[in-house]
Image (spheres, helix red, strand yellow):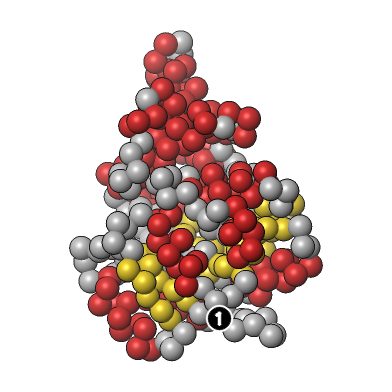
Protein backbone atom coordinates (compact mmCIF):
# COMPACT_ATOMS: atom_id res chain seq x y z
CA UNK A 1 0.00 0.00 0.00
CA UNK A 2 1.63 3.27 -1.11
CA UNK A 3 0.68 6.00 1.37
CA UNK A 4 0.91 9.79 1.18
CA UNK A 5 -1.15 12.26 3.24
CA UNK A 6 -3.81 9.72 4.16
CA UNK A 7 -4.31 10.29 7.89
CA UNK A 8 -8.09 10.40 7.37
CA UNK A 9 -8.43 7.12 5.48
CA UNK A 10 -5.40 4.97 6.44
CA UNK A 11 -6.86 3.27 9.50
CA UNK A 12 -10.00 2.24 7.62
CA UNK A 13 -7.97 0.98 4.64
CA UNK A 14 -5.68 -1.11 6.87
CA UNK A 15 -8.65 -2.51 8.80
CA UNK A 16 -10.27 -3.65 5.55
CA UNK A 17 -7.09 -5.57 4.65
CA UNK A 18 -6.75 -7.37 7.98
CA UNK A 19 -10.48 -8.18 7.98
CA UNK A 20 -10.03 -10.28 4.84
CA UNK A 21 -10.48 -14.05 4.91
CA UNK A 22 -7.13 -15.64 4.03
CA UNK A 23 -7.27 -18.87 1.97
CA UNK A 24 -6.18 -22.09 3.66
CA UNK A 25 -2.43 -22.60 3.46
CA UNK A 26 -1.66 -18.89 3.09
CA UNK A 27 -0.46 -16.26 5.54
CA UNK A 28 -0.68 -12.52 5.01
CA UNK A 29 1.38 -9.41 5.61
CA UNK A 30 0.73 -5.76 4.78
CA UNK A 31 3.57 -3.46 3.76
CA UNK A 32 3.03 0.31 3.82
CA UNK A 33 5.34 2.39 1.60
CA UNK A 34 5.32 5.72 3.42
CA UNK A 35 5.91 8.85 1.33
CA UNK A 36 6.88 12.23 2.80
CA UNK A 37 3.45 13.15 4.17
CA UNK A 38 2.75 16.64 5.49
CA UNK A 39 -0.05 15.49 7.82
CA UNK A 40 -0.13 12.89 10.64
CA UNK A 41 -0.05 9.85 8.34
CA UNK A 42 3.26 8.54 9.72
CA UNK A 43 1.97 8.73 13.29
CA UNK A 44 -1.15 6.79 12.30
CA UNK A 45 1.03 4.18 10.56
CA UNK A 46 3.26 3.82 13.64
CA UNK A 47 0.23 3.24 15.86
CA UNK A 48 -1.18 0.69 13.41
CA UNK A 49 2.13 -1.22 13.27
CA UNK A 50 1.91 -1.66 17.04
CA UNK A 51 -1.60 -3.07 16.73
CA UNK A 52 -0.89 -5.43 13.82
CA UNK A 53 2.15 -7.69 14.07
CA UNK A 54 1.97 -8.47 10.34
CA UNK A 55 2.17 -4.82 9.29
CA UNK A 56 5.52 -3.50 8.07
CA UNK A 57 6.58 -0.08 6.80
CA UNK A 58 9.20 1.09 4.32
CA UNK A 59 10.26 4.65 3.58
CA UNK A 60 9.39 5.95 0.12
CA UNK A 61 11.34 9.25 0.15
CA UNK A 62 10.15 10.53 -3.25
CA UNK A 63 6.52 9.74 -2.58
CA UNK A 64 5.84 8.36 -6.06
CA UNK A 65 3.26 5.58 -6.24
CA UNK A 66 5.25 3.38 -8.61
CA UNK A 67 8.41 3.69 -6.49
CA UNK A 68 6.49 2.88 -3.31
CA UNK A 69 4.90 -0.18 -4.90
CA UNK A 70 8.28 -1.49 -6.05
CA UNK A 71 9.79 -0.97 -2.59
CA UNK A 72 6.94 -2.85 -0.94
CA UNK A 73 7.03 -5.67 -3.51
CA UNK A 74 10.76 -6.03 -2.87
CA UNK A 75 10.07 -6.70 0.82
CA UNK A 76 7.11 -9.01 0.23
CA UNK A 77 7.65 -12.65 1.16
CA UNK A 78 4.69 -14.15 -0.69
CA UNK A 79 4.08 -15.21 -4.27
CA UNK A 80 0.75 -13.35 -4.43
CA UNK A 81 1.04 -9.56 -4.44
CA UNK A 82 -2.17 -7.66 -3.68
CA UNK A 83 -2.03 -3.98 -4.51
CA UNK A 84 -4.14 -1.97 -2.08
CA UNK A 85 -4.73 1.74 -1.73
CA UNK A 86 -5.01 3.99 1.31
CA UNK A 87 -7.92 5.83 -0.33
CA UNK A 88 -10.01 2.70 -0.71
CA UNK A 89 -11.40 -0.29 1.19
CA UNK A 90 -11.45 -3.97 0.20
CA UNK A 91 -14.87 -5.63 0.41
CA UNK A 92 -15.45 -9.01 2.06
CA UNK A 93 -14.05 -11.98 0.14
CA UNK A 94 -11.77 -9.92 -2.11
CA UNK A 95 -8.51 -11.66 -1.22
CA UNK A 96 -9.93 -15.19 -1.06
CA UNK A 97 -11.70 -14.89 -4.41
CA UNK A 98 -8.69 -13.33 -6.16
CA UNK A 99 -6.29 -16.01 -4.91
CA UNK A 100 -8.71 -18.75 -5.99
CA UNK A 101 -8.87 -17.25 -9.49
CA UNK A 102 -5.06 -17.26 -9.75
CA UNK A 103 -4.96 -20.89 -8.60
CA UNK A 104 -7.68 -21.96 -11.04
CA UNK A 105 -6.13 -20.36 -14.12
CA UNK A 106 -2.31 -20.35 -14.37
CA UNK A 107 -2.51 -18.08 -17.42
CA UNK A 108 -3.74 -15.15 -15.28
CA UNK A 109 -0.91 -12.79 -14.32
CA UNK A 110 -3.10 -10.11 -12.75
CA UNK A 111 -6.74 -10.09 -11.66
CA UNK A 112 -8.92 -7.21 -10.51
CA UNK A 113 -12.51 -6.12 -10.22
CA UNK A 114 -14.81 -3.15 -9.71
CA UNK A 115 -13.71 0.26 -8.44
CA UNK A 116 -16.83 0.93 -6.36
CA UNK A 117 -16.82 4.71 -5.93
CA UNK A 118 -18.86 5.97 -2.98
CA UNK A 119 -19.48 9.56 -1.89
CA UNK A 120 -19.84 11.10 1.55
CA UNK A 121 -21.62 14.34 0.58
CA UNK A 122 -23.30 15.90 -2.46
CA UNK A 123 -20.07 16.72 -4.25
CA UNK A 124 -18.33 13.36 -3.75
CA UNK A 125 -21.60 11.52 -4.46
CA UNK A 126 -21.75 13.31 -7.82
CA UNK A 127 -18.14 12.31 -8.51
CA UNK A 128 -18.90 8.71 -7.50
CA UNK A 129 -21.91 8.61 -9.86
CA UNK A 130 -19.73 9.91 -12.68
CA UNK A 131 -17.09 7.26 -11.98
CA UNK A 132 -19.67 4.49 -12.24
CA UNK A 133 -21.40 5.89 -15.33
CA UNK A 134 -20.52 5.57 -19.00
CA UNK A 135 -21.18 9.31 -19.18
CA UNK A 136 -18.34 9.96 -16.78
CA UNK A 137 -15.40 7.64 -17.42
CA UNK A 138 -16.50 5.86 -20.57
CA UNK A 139 -17.98 2.66 -19.23
CA UNK A 140 -14.85 0.57 -18.60
CA UNK A 141 -15.63 -2.72 -16.82
CA UNK A 142 -13.76 -1.83 -13.68
CA UNK A 143 -15.97 1.25 -13.31
CA UNK A 144 -19.37 -0.08 -14.36
CA UNK A 145 -19.05 -3.86 -13.95
CA UNK A 146 -19.65 -6.57 -16.53
CA UNK A 147 -18.90 -10.19 -17.24
CA UNK A 148 -15.70 -11.86 -16.09
CA UNK A 149 -12.99 -12.17 -18.71
CA UNK A 150 -9.72 -10.84 -20.14
CA UNK A 151 -9.32 -7.03 -20.28
CA UNK A 152 -6.58 -4.51 -21.07
CA UNK A 153 -6.25 -3.28 -17.48
CA UNK A 154 -7.85 -3.53 -14.03
CA UNK A 155 -8.12 -1.37 -10.93
CA UNK A 156 -5.32 -2.04 -8.40
CA UNK A 157 -4.80 -5.76 -9.09
CA UNK A 158 -3.75 -9.07 -7.55
CA UNK A 159 -0.54 -10.31 -9.18
CA UNK A 160 1.70 -13.32 -9.28
CA UNK A 161 5.01 -12.04 -7.96
CA UNK A 162 6.86 -14.11 -10.57
CA UNK A 163 4.94 -12.30 -13.32
CA UNK A 164 5.71 -8.90 -11.78
CA UNK A 165 9.41 -9.74 -11.70
CA UNK A 166 9.29 -11.07 -15.26
CA UNK A 167 7.67 -7.82 -16.41
CA UNK A 168 10.23 -5.69 -14.56
CA UNK A 169 7.87 -4.29 -11.87
CA UNK A 170 6.26 -0.84 -12.15
CA UNK A 171 7.99 1.76 -14.31
CA UNK A 172 9.12 4.41 -11.83
CA UNK A 173 9.32 6.99 -14.60
CA UNK A 174 5.53 6.72 -15.03
CA UNK A 175 3.69 8.82 -12.44
CA UNK A 176 0.09 8.31 -13.60
CA UNK A 177 -1.27 5.33 -15.50
CA UNK A 178 1.48 3.07 -14.18
CA UNK A 179 -1.03 0.24 -13.72
CA UNK A 180 -2.20 0.45 -17.35
CA UNK A 181 1.40 0.60 -18.61
CA UNK A 182 2.43 -2.43 -16.52
CA UNK A 183 -0.61 -4.43 -17.63
CA UNK A 184 0.33 -3.88 -21.27
CA UNK A 185 3.75 -5.41 -20.57
CA UNK A 186 2.16 -8.31 -18.70
CA UNK A 187 -0.15 -8.99 -21.64
CA UNK A 188 2.78 -8.66 -24.03
CA UNK A 189 4.53 -11.50 -22.16
CA UNK A 190 1.55 -13.77 -22.86
CA UNK A 191 -0.19 -13.55 -19.47
CA UNK A 192 -3.85 -12.67 -19.00
CA UNK A 193 -5.09 -9.56 -17.22
CA UNK A 194 -8.45 -10.73 -15.86
CA UNK A 195 -11.57 -8.92 -14.66
CA UNK A 196 -14.04 -10.47 -12.21
CA UNK A 197 -17.04 -8.41 -10.98
CA UNK A 198 -17.06 -10.24 -7.64
CA UNK A 199 -13.91 -8.34 -6.68
CA UNK A 200 -15.06 -4.96 -5.38
CA UNK A 201 -13.00 -2.18 -3.85
CA UNK A 202 -14.75 0.81 -2.28
CA UNK A 203 -13.09 4.01 -3.50
CA UNK A 204 -13.48 7.45 -1.93
CA UNK A 205 -13.26 10.22 -4.56
CA UNK A 206 -11.43 13.52 -4.22
CA UNK A 207 -13.37 15.81 -1.90
CA UNK A 208 -12.92 19.19 -3.65
CA UNK A 209 -13.29 20.59 -7.15
CA UNK A 210 -9.63 21.70 -7.22
CA UNK A 211 -8.38 18.23 -6.23
CA UNK A 212 -10.64 16.55 -8.80
CA UNK A 213 -9.56 18.89 -11.61
CA UNK A 214 -5.88 18.40 -10.77
CA UNK A 215 -6.28 14.62 -10.60
CA UNK A 216 -7.99 14.39 -13.99
CA UNK A 217 -5.69 16.83 -15.75
CA UNK A 218 -2.58 14.98 -14.59
CA UNK A 219 -4.10 11.58 -15.37
CA UNK A 220 -5.01 12.78 -18.88
CA UNK A 221 -1.54 14.27 -19.32
CA UNK A 222 0.15 10.96 -18.56
CA UNK A 223 -2.38 8.93 -20.56
CA UNK A 224 -1.62 11.12 -23.58
CA UNK A 225 2.10 10.60 -23.14
CA UNK A 226 1.74 6.82 -22.71
CA UNK A 227 -0.70 6.57 -25.64
CA UNK A 228 1.77 8.36 -27.90
CA UNK A 229 4.31 5.63 -27.07
CA UNK A 230 1.89 2.72 -27.56
CA UNK A 231 -0.81 3.65 -30.08
CA UNK A 232 -1.78 0.04 -30.78
CA UNK A 233 -3.18 -0.41 -27.24
CA UNK A 234 -5.11 2.86 -27.03
CA UNK A 235 -8.80 2.20 -26.30
CA UNK A 236 -11.47 4.34 -27.95
CA UNK A 237 -12.74 5.43 -24.52
CA UNK A 238 -9.44 7.20 -23.87
CA UNK A 239 -9.88 9.25 -27.05
CA UNK A 240 -13.42 10.46 -26.24
CA UNK A 241 -12.47 13.37 -23.91
CA UNK A 242 -9.81 14.89 -26.22
CA UNK A 243 -12.20 14.48 -29.15
CA UNK A 244 -14.87 16.29 -27.14
CA UNK A 245 -12.48 19.18 -26.49
CA UNK A 246 -11.62 19.48 -30.18
CA UNK A 247 -15.25 19.24 -31.32
CA UNK A 248 -16.56 21.88 -28.91
CA UNK A 249 -13.69 24.25 -29.66
CA UNK A 250 -13.87 24.04 -33.46
CA UNK A 251 -17.08 22.40 -34.65
CA UNK A 252 -19.95 22.02 -32.18
CA UNK A 253 -21.36 24.92 -30.09
CA UNK A 254 -20.49 24.58 -26.42
CA UNK A 255 -24.12 25.13 -25.42
CA UNK A 256 -25.08 21.88 -27.18
CA UNK A 257 -22.71 19.95 -24.91
CA UNK A 258 -23.91 21.81 -21.81
CA UNK A 259 -27.55 21.04 -22.65
CA UNK A 260 -26.61 17.36 -22.93
CA UNK A 261 -24.93 17.53 -19.50
CA UNK A 262 -28.08 19.14 -18.11
CA UNK A 263 -30.24 16.32 -19.50
CA UNK A 264 -27.91 13.67 -18.04
CA UNK A 265 -27.96 15.35 -14.63
CA UNK A 266 -31.74 15.82 -14.70
CA UNK A 267 -32.38 12.14 -15.47
CA UNK A 268 -29.79 10.75 -13.04
CA UNK A 269 -31.30 8.94 -10.05
CA UNK A 270 -29.79 11.33 -7.53
CA UNK A 271 -31.08 13.92 -5.04
CA UNK A 272 -31.60 17.38 -6.56
CA UNK A 273 -28.71 18.84 -4.56
CA UNK A 274 -26.35 16.17 -5.93
CA UNK A 275 -27.56 16.74 -9.52
CA UNK A 276 -26.41 20.35 -9.30
CA UNK A 277 -22.88 19.21 -8.48
CA UNK A 278 -23.05 16.61 -11.25
CA UNK A 279 -23.45 19.44 -13.80
CA UNK A 280 -20.08 20.74 -12.56
CA UNK A 281 -18.35 17.39 -12.07
CA UNK A 282 -18.96 15.92 -15.54
CA UNK A 283 -17.50 18.87 -17.53
CA UNK A 284 -14.58 19.01 -15.09
CA UNK A 285 -13.76 15.36 -15.69
CA UNK A 286 -14.23 15.57 -19.46
CA UNK A 287 -12.34 18.78 -20.13
CA UNK A 288 -9.44 18.51 -17.68
CA UNK A 289 -8.76 14.94 -18.80
CA UNK A 290 -9.20 15.83 -22.47
CA UNK A 291 -6.97 18.90 -22.34
CA UNK A 292 -4.40 16.92 -20.37
CA UNK A 293 -4.45 14.10 -22.93
CA UNK A 294 -3.91 16.48 -25.84
CA UNK A 295 -1.08 18.23 -23.98
CA UNK A 296 0.59 14.93 -23.08
CA UNK A 297 0.30 13.56 -26.61
CA UNK A 298 1.66 16.72 -28.26
CA UNK A 299 4.17 17.73 -25.58
CA UNK A 300 5.16 14.58 -23.66
CA UNK A 301 7.84 16.43 -21.69
CA UNK A 302 5.04 18.18 -19.78
CA UNK A 303 4.44 14.88 -17.96
CA UNK A 304 7.35 15.00 -15.56
CA UNK A 305 8.36 12.03 -13.36
CA UNK A 306 8.45 14.21 -10.26
CA UNK A 307 4.94 15.68 -10.72
CA UNK A 308 2.42 13.56 -8.87
Q: Is residue 166 above or below residue 1?
A: above
In this orientation, which residue lies closer to the viewer: 226 or 149?
Answer: 226
In this orientation, which residue lies closer to the viewer: 68 or 5?
Answer: 68
Quadrant of the rendered structure where residue 205 is? Answer: bottom left
Q: Residue furthest left?
A: 38
Q: Residue at x 30, y 44 (%)?
A: 307
Residue 139 at x, y = what percent? Answer: 59, 41
Total number of numbered labels?
Answer: 1
* Secondary structure under the numbered disc 1 in the rendered image: loop
Q: Is residue 236 above or below residue 92?
A: above
Quarter placement of the N terminus = bottom left
Q: Residue at x 50, y 66 (%)?
A: 73
Q: Residue furthest top?
A: 251
Residue 252 at x, y = what percent? Answer: 46, 13
Q: Residue at x 46, y 61 (%)?
A: 70
* Number of other residues with Cα within 10 Å of mark 1, as a class: few under 14, some 14 to 19, many 20 or more: some
Q: From where the camera sits, is residue 202 visible?
A: yes
In this figure, which residue is indicated by the disc labeled 1? 28
Q: Is residue 295 above or below residue 56?
A: above
Quadrant of the rendered structure where residue 8 is? Answer: bottom left
Q: From where the camera sits, is residue 258 visible?
A: no
Residue 59 at x, y = what percent? Answer: 32, 68
Residue 35 at x, y = what percent? Answer: 30, 63
Q: Residue at x 62, y 56 (%)?
A: 166
Is 106 situated left or right of 25 in this image? right
Amino acid sequence: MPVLNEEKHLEQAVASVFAQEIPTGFSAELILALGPSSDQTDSVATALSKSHKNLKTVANPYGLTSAGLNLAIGLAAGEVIIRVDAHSKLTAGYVKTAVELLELNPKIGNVGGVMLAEGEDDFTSAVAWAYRSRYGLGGGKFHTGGEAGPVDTVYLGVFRKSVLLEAGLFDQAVVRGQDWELNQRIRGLGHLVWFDPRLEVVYQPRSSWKALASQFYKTGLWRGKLSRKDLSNVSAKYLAPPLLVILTVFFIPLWFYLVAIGVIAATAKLPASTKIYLMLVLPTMHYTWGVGFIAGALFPDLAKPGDQ
